[in-house]
């Protein structure tokens, strides 16, 4: 999976950070130390880490991911990353 989205709430720049959905690469989620949760009322799961986005971005860069874009959506900050495939 060469693309990845991470996000956090504007008031929570120190974490937690949403790092994936139920279809995310389990190896990357394990590397980040992410835990899979399902919020009450949702019919999908998400992966979260307690780290702030800056630390998550640093970790992902070490395994080959690069930031393509970043934006704010309402009260949410979102980063889109890509990893070149061999």
Image (tube, rainbow, N blue to C red):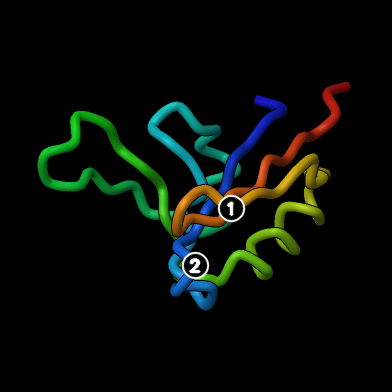
Q: For residue 41, what is the image quadrant?
A: top left
Q: Earlier in the sequence, mark 1 or mark 2?
A: 2
In the depicted structure, whether residue 70 falls above or below residue 43: below
Asked if marks 1 and 2 touch (Cβ < 8 Å), the reply is yes
62 to the left or right of 42: right
In the depicted structure, whether residue 2 falls above or below residue 12: above
- Give the residue furthest to the top: 86
Q: In percent of the image, x 45 and y 74: which residue is there?
A: 11
The N terminus sits in image quarter: top right
Q: In percent of the image, x 83 and y 24: which residue is there?
A: 85
Q: For residue 48, what is the image quadrant?
A: bottom left
2 to the left or right of 39: right
Q: Nearer the viewer, residue 72 or 57?
A: 72
Q: Position of residue 10 (x, y in %)?
A: 49, 67
Q: For residue 57, what is the image quadrant?
A: bottom right
CA distance for labels 1 and 2: 8 Å
Q: In percent of the image, x 27 and y 48: which residue is there?
A: 37
61 to the left or right of 59: right
Q: Nearer the viewer, residue 60 or 79?
A: 79
Q: In percent of the image, x 78 and y 48: which residue is there?
A: 63
Tell me the SS state at disc 1.
Answer: strand
The residue at which mark 2 appears reads as 10
Tell me the SS state at disc 2.
Answer: helix
Q: Position of residue 40 (x, y in %)?
A: 12, 46
Q: Position of residue 38 (x, y in %)?
A: 22, 43
Q: Which mark is residue 27?
A: none
Q: Residues within 10 Å of mark 1 (few under 14, many from 20)?
A: few
The residue at which mark 1 appears reads as 72
- Give the residue furthest to the front: 74
């Amino acid at each position: 999976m060469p693309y990845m989205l991470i996000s956090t709430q504007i008031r929570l720049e120190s974490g937690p950070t949403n790092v994936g959905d139920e279809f995310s690469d389990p190896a990357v989620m394990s590397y980040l130390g992410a835990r899979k949760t399902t919020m009450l009322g949702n019919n999908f799961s998400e992966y979260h880490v307690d780290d702030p986005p800056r630390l998550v971005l640093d970790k992902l860069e070490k395994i080959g991911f690069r930031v393509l874009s970043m934006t704010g959506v309402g009260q949410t900050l979102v980063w889109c990353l890509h990893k070149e495939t061999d």
